[in-house]
């Protein structure tokens, strides 16, 4: 049994560790996997990184819908390259979560059981080809605004994963915008209407990607103190709107928001009320495509089980060969 003085020593030791940890955070020194960290920091990072990884993997599905129907060979190659990039992003992120002690199989099982979150945006349908462009331009555009900041997040492996991911996301955004530009500047009236309709459907759900308003965001305050997050949800949402409107105007399209207007005094665009009921409805699993996305993921996981078994058998054989070679 511990004496009270031992207990005191234990807790002051822990608070020394905590103080040293916070000093590093203040000094912008990255926290690495083998460094001491508060249990809550570890838990919150696993939460955010695994949700982010799931978003990348589920995010492949709305676009995958168009691979067999892309209008030209060039567009098909671009789309396939983009979707493969998303798979890669998911893998970097699951690896980053593993450095914190997360079990990838368990995290994926939680996703497939409907117990884990992933970005709300991927629960909306993609009925038209213009949606492929809108996802690249607006969805990846919103993701970049959020992820550029995460390159400076306090956990080293997450920050480094973000550097590579951001480079690839920039390509995604450009391919989306170029696709829409071609439709708007060279297309017929039906194609132009298709672009505007797509923007009308995606505009508000994209603004929801940044998460609830700051006053309703339970994780933000602690994540900002630990510098996991560097800007609040509302700050990033505003930044995205400010940089997107000139691109929207150049495209010759409009946003479905009558309250959207430049506010010279604030130096920012004002915008209308976000329908937060819709956001929470989607988070609860009731969006237009939640069920379909999870069903597709589960089916892909089951059908891919022979690949995982083959890879594991190959790895075992290689290990045996290496062991035998070491004994020769
Ligand atoms: N959708 O306290 P809050 C991509 C959850 S993929 C669903 O503000 P936090 C791409 C939130 O998780 C881009 N859930 O949370 C891929 C929390 O739930 P729990 C994905 C959301 O963590 C393929 C609760 O609501 N990007 O770019 O401080 C093709 C309260 O929120 C959402 C990332 O994942 C949402 N939109 O801030 C194309 C970026 N928003 O855990 C493109 C990394 C909030 O308490 N993540 N929730 O049950 C982050 O930066 C932060 O986690 C968030 C939320 C800003 C998203």
Image (spheres, rainbow, N blue to C red):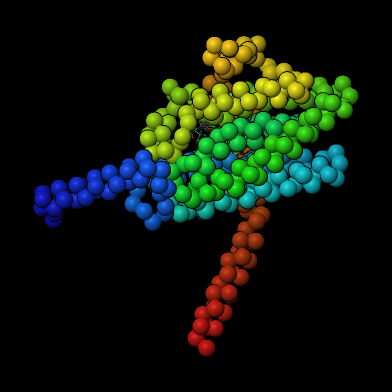
Lateral position of residue 224 relative to residue 257, left or right:
left
Q: Is residue 95 above or below residue 236?
A: below
Q: Locate the N terminus and report the quarter of the image it occupies.
A: bottom left
Farthest bottom residue in view: 328
Q: Is residue 241 above or below residue 297?
A: above
**Residue depicted at x 70% and y 32%:** 137
Lateral position of residue 307 relative to residue 228, left or right:
right
Query: x and y percent of residue 234 in the render?
Result: 51, 24
Q: Is residue 205 above or below residue 103?
A: above
Q: Quadrant of residue 129?
A: top right
**Which residue occupies the foreground of this view, 87 or 36?**
36
**Residue depicted at x 42% and y 31%:** 220
**Residue depicted at x 61% and y 65%:** 311
**Which residue occupies the foreground of this view, 127 or 162?**
162
Query: x and y percent of residue 79 in the render?
Result: 75, 43
Lateral position of residue 157 relative to residue 297, left or right:
left
**Residue depicted at x 81% and y 41%:** 75
Regarding residue 37, the answer to whether it shows in the image is yes
Q: Quadrant of residue 148?
A: top right
Lateral position of residue 176 relative to residue 217, left or right:
right
Regarding residue 286, the answer to whether it shows in the image is no
Query: x and y percent of residue 327 in the render?
Result: 50, 86
**Which residue occupies the foreground of this view, 70 or 12?**
12
């Amino acid at each position: 049994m511990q004496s009270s003085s031992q207990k005191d020593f234990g807790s002051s030791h822990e608070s020394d560790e905590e103080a040293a940890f916070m000093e590093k955070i203040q000094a912008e020194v990255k926290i690495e996997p083998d460094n001491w960290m508060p249990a809550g920091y570890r838990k919150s990072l696993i939460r955010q990184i695994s949700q982010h990884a799931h978003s990348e993997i589920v995010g492949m599905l709305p676009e995958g819908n168009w691979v067999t129907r892309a209008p030209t060979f060039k567009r098909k190659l671009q789309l396939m390259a983009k979707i493969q990039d998303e798979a890669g992003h998911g893998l970097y992120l699951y690896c980053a979560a593993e450095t914190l002690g997360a079990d990838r199989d368990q995290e994926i099982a939680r996703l497939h059981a409907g117990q884990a979150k992933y970005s709300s945006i991927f629960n909306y349908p993609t009925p038209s080809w213009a949606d492929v462009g809108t996802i690249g331009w607006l969805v990846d555009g919103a993701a970049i605004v959020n992820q550029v900041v995460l390159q400076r997040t306090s956990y080293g492996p997450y920050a480094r994963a973000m550097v590579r991911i951001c480079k690839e996301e920039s390509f995604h955004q450009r391919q989306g915008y170029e696709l829409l530009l071609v439709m708007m500047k060279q297309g017929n009236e039906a194609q132009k209407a298709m672009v505007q309709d797509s923007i009308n459907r995606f505009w508000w759900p994209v603004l929801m990607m940044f998460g609830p308003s700051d006053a309703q965001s339970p994780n933000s305050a602690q994540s900002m103190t630990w510098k996991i997050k560097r800007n609040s949800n509302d700050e990033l949402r505003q930044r995205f709107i400010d940089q997107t409107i000139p691109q929207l105007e150049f495209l010759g399209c409009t946003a479905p928001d009558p309250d959207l207007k430049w506010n010279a005094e604030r130096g920012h665009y004002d915008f209308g009320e976000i329908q937060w009921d819709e956001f929470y409805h989607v988070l609860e699993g009731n969006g237009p495509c939640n069920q379909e996305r999870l069903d597709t993921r589960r089916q892909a996981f089951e059908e891919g089980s022979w690949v995982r078994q083959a890879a594991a058998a190959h790895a075992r054989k290689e290990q045996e060969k290496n062991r035998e070679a070491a004994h020769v």
